[in-house]
Image (cartoon, grey):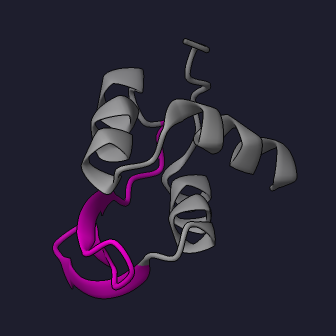
């Protein structure tokens, strides 16, 4: 498996939107996204620092996004 690259919350939100996720609501400093096609949910923290790689991996797993698809989307953005 390819290693995950670190990224900011803003970039993660752009990528979630690229995969069809829409902002459902916010709770504090977390944005909750929902994908109506696959009925999955993803919670993205909105902080200024880069996301830890474990947190990013967990968000991708929760959203149902494969790492290879994620890397392709990173290259496009």
Task: Specify whether 46 is left or right of 12.
Answer: left
Where residue 60 sits, quadrant-wise, is: top left
The residue drawn where x is 52% and y is 76% is: 20
List the single residue furthest toward the right.
76
The residue drawn where x is 28% and y is 61% is: 42
Q: Nearer the viewer, residue 5 or 10?
A: 5
Look at the image and tell me in which quarter the C terminus lies.
bottom right
Look at the image and tell me in which quarter the N terminus lies.
top right
Total numbered badges shown on the rendered structure: 0
Image x and y of residue 75, in percent: 83, 42
- Residue 47 among magenta residues: yes
Residue range (magenta): 22-50
Task: Specify whether 29 is left or right of 19.
Answer: left
Image x and y of residue 9, in percent: 49, 53
Q: Nearer the viewer, residue 40 or 16?
A: 40
In this picture, is 5 found above or below 59? Answer: above
List the single residue furthest toward the left.
27
In this picture, is 12 found above or below 35? Answer: above
Where residue 7 sits, quadrant-wise, is: top right
In this picture, is 48 found above or below 20? Answer: above
Image x and y of residue 32, in percent: 25, 73
- Residue 75 among magenta residues: no
The residue drawn where x is 51% and y is 64% is: 16
Task: Specify whether 65 is left or right of 2.
Answer: left
Main SS of residues in magenta: strand
In this picture, is 26 found above or below 45? Answer: below
Where residue 45 sits, quadrant-wise, is: bottom left
Task: Specify whether 55 is left or right of 65.
Answer: left
């Amino acid at each position: 498996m390819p290693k995950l690259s670190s990224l900011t919350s803003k970039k993660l939100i752009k990528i979630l939107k690229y995969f069809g996720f829409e902002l459902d609501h916010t709770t504090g400093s977390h944005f909750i996204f929902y994908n109506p096609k696959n009925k999955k949910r993803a919670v993205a923290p909105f902080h200024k620092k880069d996301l830890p790689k474990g947190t990013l991996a967990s968000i991708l797993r929760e959203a149902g996004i494969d790492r290879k698809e994620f890397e392709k989307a990173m290259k496009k953005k």
